[in-house]
Amino acid sequence: MKSVTGSLPNGSEHPIADLRRIVEQQRELEREANVLVRTARNQGHSWESIANALGVSKQAAHKKFGK
């Protein structure tokens, strides 16, 4: 029988701890994206240019960040 840990990225033996770390990283990146989008809007950048930078549609960017 093949070891489950052998198939985990980087040979991790602590997948739960790694998942928690990844979730926290995602939250931090989301906070950074919010700040950068607000900054871009305050500097006069269009939703279209912000959407292009994010790789999403203008509508998706506005829906997610246009609060």
Image (cartoon, rainbow, N blue to C red):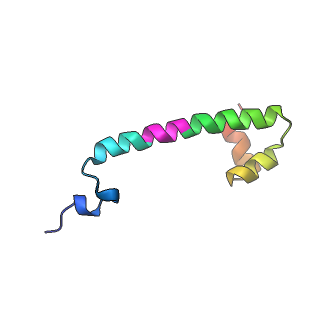
Q: Magenta segment: does it hold 30?
A: no
The residue lying furthest to the left in this view is: 1
Q: Quadrant of the N terminus?
A: bottom left
Between 44 and 58, the residue placed more toward the observer is: 44
Residue at position x 75%, y 53% in the image: 52
Which residue is farthest right? 44
Q: Residue furthest front?
A: 10
Nearer to us in this view, 65 or 2:
2
Give the vertical position of 23 relative to 55 (above or below): above
Q: Residue visible at 73% across and 33% down?
A: 38
Give the left or right position of residue 59, taking residue 9 as reference.
right
Which residue range is magenta in the image? Answer: 23-28
Residue 13, horizontal then vertical, whole percent: 24, 51
Place of residue 41 in the rendered image (x, y in percent of width and height, measured from the top left)? 80, 35
Q: Is residue 27 magenta?
A: yes
Magenta segment, prevailing SS (helix, strand or loop): helix
Quadrant of the frame with the C terminus: top right
Q: Residue at x 29, y 43 (%)?
A: 16
Residue 19, percent from left and from top: 36, 44
> Which residue is drawn at the image coordinates 64% and 39% (left, top)?
33
Q: Is residue 36 left or right of residue 21?
A: right
Is residue 33 depicted above or below 13 in this figure?
Answer: above
Determine if residue 66 is in view.
no
Vertical relation: 8 (above or below) 62: below
